[in-house]
Image: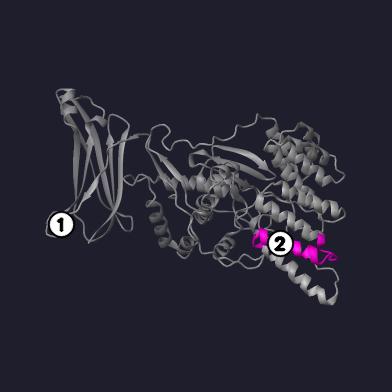
Amino acid sequence: MKIAIGWNRRTLAVTGAVVMAFLPPAILHADDRKEADHLYQEARRLTITQQWDKAVGLYQRFLNRFTENSNQDDALFWIAYCMEKKSGASMEAYQAYDELICQYPNSPWVDDAVVHQILMVEQFVREGREQYRPFLLEKLADEDVNIRRQAALALGSLRDERALPSLQEMLAIEDFKIEAGEILKRMKTPPRESPAREAESAIGTGDLQFKVETEKKPAPEMQKEKKSVFPFFETRRHQLYKSMLKTDGTWTRDERINFGMWTVLSTDQFEALAALKGYDRLEWLRKYWKLRDPTPTTEINECRDEFEQRVEYAWENFSETWNYRNFKVLQDQYLRDGWPHAPWDARGEIYILYGEPESISIAGFNEEEWAYNRYRIDFIVERYRTNIYKDAIRLGPLSQELYADNPEWAHYNFIENREFRYTHNYHAKPFKSFKPEFRIPAESDTGRIAVVYTIPTGEFKISRQEGGQGIAYNECWVVLDEDMREVVRRERSYTVTRPEKKEIKNLKTVSGRIPLDLPPGQYLFALEIKDLKNPRLGLYVETFEVR
């Protein structure tokens, strides 16, 4: 989401959550002042709550009715802002900012309006509308130094070499040297190709993979937490977030892991974890990650290892602070020295949730586009601030096109849903016909619960064995109780041989029966069949209850 940089004393930085400059209305007639104030404040409230159409309607009523009010230019700015937030970089929003500039050329809001226009024109040019590039070149020579710099950043992001002199000068300016340096560096490298629009197959190499990710389902009717009037954001999740922030940036490994858990857990889950200490906390974490273990028959939990590696990577790569402007509100969202802040910004949040993206490219001022072809999603992610106010991460251009028919589902499934996504590669192809099933005896039967399976011999590699031709495979299974503790484990290797290869093929299948004699309770059963002569694997995991 674009940031409107405000350098007038009346203007605060405008973020996606909307930061409003509180200005008293002009002196009005006594009978009109109260109504004007009420109408304007109601329009502001609708802007804060992102009800863009209703806000525009009230601002327009305010403009039409109170033509002498000193907040007329303010109302014009917020009309354009609401249009921009509703439709993105649109010609309607651009023209609305232009109306403010033309009607009130001396307004303190003019510079902010021009900055918004620059950011929108940058997007226009990215979309192929080159006729708007001269606007940026015109602003590159503007008498206002801040507008010149913003135009240089936009042209530099578009790889326009005419911005080079200004960008070189900005390297010596504290507020701009990081952004200018990054753009100059990227201008020296060949442009990246756009991410592929179609996802890579989850089994692109034919190898068996295990996905830990959210089940795709329609966005439910979520129970919205009651929000206070801006700038207060006192939700349960925000309170948990604020309790973990630090001013000195010295995060221990346990604190980083804890913040990582806040990133991947729902509010209810994290509250439950935060209430635990010592052994109980360790047990909660062990059980949580064991339920997501892609190889439950082994001692290694690759999913948990991957999570902890992502946390460390986020800390090492996305924790830099940005001492740009002394924002007066939403300070807990920004990573700035001396302020209470998180260990990483929104990029770290996305990295922990999704892992390494296939590509990263500059998308705008302090913005990057992260593309995950394997999940059919891309994001626009902001640097130097977190997504606690839900305005630092949004769907990227490819996702907006791909999910144009249902953007609400895409936003919920990929941004609101804080599920940890991980795909485990077993480096083995799956047995195509491996479908074990539980056999539960009738009440009058004295037999035990059993798991049975069959696999066609044609799926195994037939190789020379002692005594002729044959197949060899390993059977490993484990039963875990409701606390995810191991109750039973068995492992055994089998060899089936015949004098001739065709005799093995004539067997059609190999089969197995695993009896389970367990006391009443909830259990998890995991079975792994591995071809010892070929990278083929069958994995079966099921929960069941013994009554």
Please give the residue where the numbered disc 2 appears in the rendered image: 57
Q: Which residues are magenta?
A: 48-72
Label 2 amino acid? Gly
For the residues marked 1 and 2, what is the alpha-carbon distance in whole angstroms? 69 Å
Asked whether the residues under the numbered discs 1 and 2 touch, taking CB atoms below 8 Å apart as contact, a structural biologist would say no
For label 2, count other residues whose C-alpha is less than 10 Å away and answer few (under 14), some (14-19) or many (20+): few
Left or right of 53 in this view: 438: left
Residue 527 placement (x, y as % from top left): 27, 44
* Residue 157 higher or lower than 259, as above or below: above
Left or right of 536 in this view: 444: left
Question: What is the magenta segment's predominant secondary structure?
Answer: helix
Residue sitting at 81 percent across and 63 percent down? 71
- What colouring method underlies this structural image? one colour
Looking at the rendered image, the disc whose residue lies closer to the viewer, 1 or 2, is 2
Label 1 amino acid? Ala
**In the image, is residue 59 part of the stretch drawn in magenta?**
yes
Between 256 and 207, the one lying in front of the other is 207
Q: Element at badge 2?
A: helix
Residue sitting at 61 percent across and 48 percent down? 319
Between 453 and 265, the one lying in front of the other is 453
